[in-house]
Image: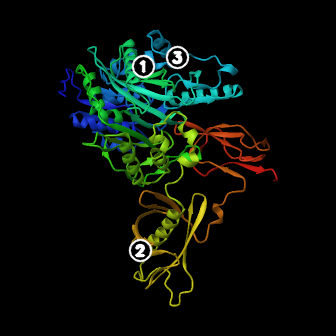
Amino acid sequence: MELPIPTRPVTRVLVANRGEIARRVFRTCRDLGIGTVAVHSDADAGSPHRAEADRAVRLPGSAPADTYLRADLLVAAALAAGADAVHPGYGFLSEDAGFARAVLDAGLTWIGPPPAAIAAMGSKIAAKERMAAAGVPVLELAQVTEADLPVLVKASAGGGGRGMRVVRRLADLDGELAAARAEAASAFGDPTVFVEPYVEAGRHVEVQVLADTHGTVWSLGERECSLQRRHQKVVEETPSPFVDADLRAALSAAAVTAARAIDYVGAGTVEFLVRADGAFFFLETNTRLQVEHPVTECVTGLDLVAWQLRIAAGAALPPSPPAPRGHAIEVRLYAEDPAAGWRPASGTVHAFDVPGTPFAVPPGPGTRVDAGVVAGSEVGTHYDPMLAKVVAWAPTRDEAAARLAGALAGARLHGPATNRDLLVCTLRHPAFLAGETDTAFFDRHGLAALAAPLAGPDDVALAAVAAALALAAARRRDATVLGGLPGGWRNVPSQLQRAAFAHGGETVEVGYRLTRDGLLGVPGVELVSATPDEVVLAVDGVQRRLRVAAYGDDVRVDGDGWAVALRALPRFPDPSAAVAAGSLVAPMPGSVVAVDVAAGDRVTAGQRLLVLEAMKMQHPVTAPADGAVTSVDVSVGDQVGAGAVLAVLEGDPA
């Protein structure tokens, strides 16, 4: 396709964002010979996006409200760095009409839709009314009675699952409204929420649109984003396995109508909820690039960021878009533990090795990786826990799912816990492969199965043996005397060498001895070789290569399609590290935003005791059993680290 030449060329772009989307925009800018400017909070001072930009401007502080949500600081940064255009990325101020106006008022080019279009869709309440007037089907806003349940509480000014709650009991409505308002205010600076009917087991289907200033509006097909946790997308794909040609035409027509109704310009997404009978309803218009835009790029061959830049410079789209080819699936790799209620994780990323082309469509069927982190990055608690988007593109859906599952299973991910195993299990699940992918997928099939570790009990046992042998090899390598002797050597051996590791709340013990005749103490396993980084074991005659990495007491073992995280246990535990019985500890670093109890209060199992906020989400801490609160060790506003004692509960006698 011949590309038009912009009439008002952009020479240097500031990306008013962070993480993988900033890196993604920088990649296209480099390809087009355009200079780049990063902004970064103090928490992001060592981030990859700051390092990759030509120029960078510090935003003092770490909280979003002090940094990435400050339009005045962002505009000042663009002017100070010599940028002539601003790309908002997604999230933060990307859908803030006031920010877009401030950019334009400063004489800069805004790489996005006109402020009026953003304003028209900025309030989901007003957007629904406008779309209904344009003839696009909508879900009516609900005035809640018992007969209306279940309903969905949503933030009017943002998305990404923040400020969103399903309410199934009328008695819970006031509490969920309050929680939703608090999350919305924290994430978007606007506490306004609304309520609409909740469609059980619907499908979340969206249409990518691209429009220029010359009257051309493209529909680039649909993406299905039904697999969600906490109303935040986890798996996205195009085309949808549910949508047929007639429904595709109707969705595309509705999306183009919606775009034309607000004089839309640039890249945007019109989202719909689709029922099992094929009826669909307008949800919202995202007046920005979407997180999941890479799947559309893979099947169309377009660079949507490049087209955003060209359109902002006045270029015209060709009359019709390219025809799609093949199937693409994207998953969001999060630092979180799905089995623990999707609890976010934080810490240092020690290794991040995921196969794929970075930030670009692969030259042929293959995988793509858009990552916000690299080895050495710190995952904190101020921002969303997404580490990367991993995409597979292939001629068929089954092949794309297999490619993606294989790439994830073989990735080396050392550091905070991730949802990798959940993603692989989902991509290989028979229901997913059959296209049965509505919004109830995770609830219907259960996290007990979907979040089960890829490593089975035998794999964990083998990993512990490999870890013990690798650590012993490391000790011999680092020994200052007699390093050539095997570990635990005795003239008259009488006992096995022993090592113990913590894994999944249990202790895994290993007993072994290395002799001239090989490895003793581990039935059915022969030692082929052992170094500090790699152990090769023969199990019933089949050689298995296990890669081992140690970061202090944290030991990671990568096998063939599985990984095990172990913690080496000391031979003599430090008694001062123990906490009092009944202590409730922080599952993650965060800020205490609510304390509901005081010392002496009686509580019941499941009762909320306090609330932590981390990574833009609120996480309640509840009583594990009936009992009495003997102490509360935190107050509202306190910052706590993972493992900090929050309160102590004395349970009732059994």
Residue at position x 50%, y 19% in the image: 124
Where residue 363 appears, as percent x and y from the top left, is 24, 42
Residue 370 visible to an observer of this rendering: no
Residue marked by disc 1: 98
Q: Are marks 2 and 1 in contact (CB under 8 Å)?
A: no
List the residue tagged with mark 2. Answer: 478
Left or right: 541 as drawn, with respect to 608: left
Which one is nearer the viewer's eye here, 154 or 629? 154
On the picture, is 29 further left or further right than 347?
left
- Mark 3 belongs to which amino acid? Ile
Report the quarter where the N terminus lies: top left
**Which residue position is annotated with label 3?**
125
Position above or below: 582 against 613 = below
Q: Give the residue type at disc 2.
A: Asp
Mark 2–mark 3 Cα distance, whole angstroms, equals 65 Å
Alpha carbon separation for disc pair 2 and 1: 60 Å
Q: Position of residue 308 (x, y in %)?
A: 29, 26
Under circle 1, the secondary element is helix
Name the outermost residue toward the right: 653
Neighbour class for label 1 at 10 Å: few (<14), some, many (≥20)? Answer: some
| Sequence-first disc among 2 and 3 | 3
Q: Amino acid at mark 1?
A: Gly
394 lies above or below 242: below
Count numbered badges in the picture: 3
